[in-house]
Amino acid sequence: MKVVVRQWALVIVTLLGAELSFADLTAFVNVNVVSMSSDTVIAAQTVLVEDGTISAIGSVDEVRIPKGANAIDGTDRYLMPGLGEMHAHVPDADSSELDRYFTLFVANGITTVRGMLGRRSHLALRQQLLDGKLFGPRLITSGPSLNGRSVAGPADARRQVREQAALGYDFIKVHPGLSAAEFTALAETANELGIPFAGHVPVAAGVATALRLKMRAIDHLDGYFVALLPPGSHRSGGYGGFFDVMLANELELERIGEMVSATAAAGTWNVPTQVLVEQLVSTVPVEDLKNRPEMTYMPKQTVRDWAASKEAQIAERGFDAGIAALAIELRRKLILALHNSGAPLLLGSDAPQIFNVPGFSAHRELDVFVASGLTPFEALQTGTAAVAEFLGTNAGYVQVGKDADLVLLDANPLGDIQNSRRIHGVMLRGVWFSGKTLEERLEKFDHGDR
């Protein structure tokens, strides 16, 4: 990591006003910029945001703060793009839980979420969020999932894809249970209409078919372990466990290179949600997971349900803690191999699923990426620049002309990935929310148990 250092002298004028500012013009003054275009921190900058867009970036000695701007002191702080949670479950628009989840996401610097279990109400919700009529991150939404129970044959798969595309969903969600013919019909229709399809890899199809059909993204590394089994494996009659972790001791590891190269060649992205798998099958005690600080923001019954799910998983007949530990290690190797081969990764944790508190779990996924061998910069790319590339949005960088979805941190995230948690404030589409404002929003969901 390189750091560009400049000496400067500047008196920052602190403007009076409410914690939530709707001013059209905001200035981050004397801030260190983590642009995500390189692993370089550019020190002592002023960043101007006007009407939701970054309008100027330059030295504090050169960029003047316009009269009336909301000036935010960036001294010893770091400005980076907002993060994307690329595997989230968003409740219905009228759910009492919606504000909880959106507050948790934003308070953790998540400015974009990809909803992986869509509902009709999400179409209007997506626009309300974009227009700033509702507090929360940008929403990228799937339609209701196509799966073994919801699809009645190839013709029905084609019909549902056409209907969802016509309604304006952003992509098609694939869930387990589709036949090979149904999955092929789904994929061919989606490709014809230009709407991406993503999610699980149906067992009947397999990763090779998903890559051939140009599946846009595979979530959970679904299907890779099965694809790495030797010919004649007993897998069809054996116990695979959660995402096939119990197959880890049977894999032909020498074929990982072949699989990741095929993934890169197909242009298919991966959203590993590794933290979900690790929390469910690792030997970390249930009580330790229940006592994590972020659990205070979730309903007690939800945490109890998560604990029951983990206890049931490790108690299943055929579960082996040693093989589960090997699976965690091999999945991490697969993550690094995909990254090194040029098969792109996206940040996603599957929140709110088992012990994945929205927002907090994305930072735990970043930790896992670094533990897998990515640098902090490379890990952060999966939630910033890579998200913008995958979605085709105008965010993901701190650059002039980019959308102002930004996070101001109290420490350098390129030096230590855990500094991505040290959030001083968040800007959503040009609107600034200070840390104080975010804490006040969080307080109503804090039941005080830690």
Image (cartoon, rainbow, N blue to C red):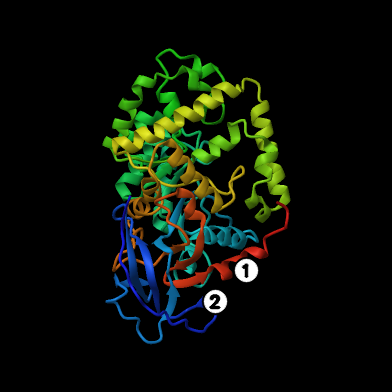
The mark that comes first in sequence, 1 or 2, is: 2
Q: Quadrant of residue 57?
A: bottom left
Write the residue at 52% across / 40% down.
Answer: 275
Query: In the visual, does 363 lie left or right of 60?
Result: right
Counting from the top left corner in percent of width and height, residue 281 is at: 59, 31
Query: In the visual, does 323 lie left or right of 414?
Result: right
Counting from the top left corner in percent of width and height, residue 51 is at: 37, 76
Q: Is residue 34 above or below residue 250?
A: below
Q: Secondary structure at mark 1?
A: helix
Q: Is residue 4 visible?
A: yes
Q: Are marks 1 and 2 in contact (CB under 8 Å)?
A: yes
Q: Quadrant of residue 353?
A: top right
Counting from the top left corner in percent of width and height, residue 241 is at: 57, 26
Write the residue at 33% across / 50% down.
Answer: 1
Name the kind of residue labelled 2 in the image.
Glu
Q: Secondary structure at mark 2?
A: loop
- For label 1, the crowd category at 10 Å Cα-Cα, with few meaning under 14, some 14 to 19 and many 20 or more, is few
Which one is nearer the viewer's eye here, 17 or 338? 17
Q: Mark 2 = which residue?
A: 19
Counting from the top left corner in percent of width and height, residue 120 is at: 52, 57
Q: Mark 1 = which residue?
A: 440
- For label 2, the crowd category at 10 Å Cα-Cα, with few meaning under 14, some 14 to 19 and many 20 or more, is few
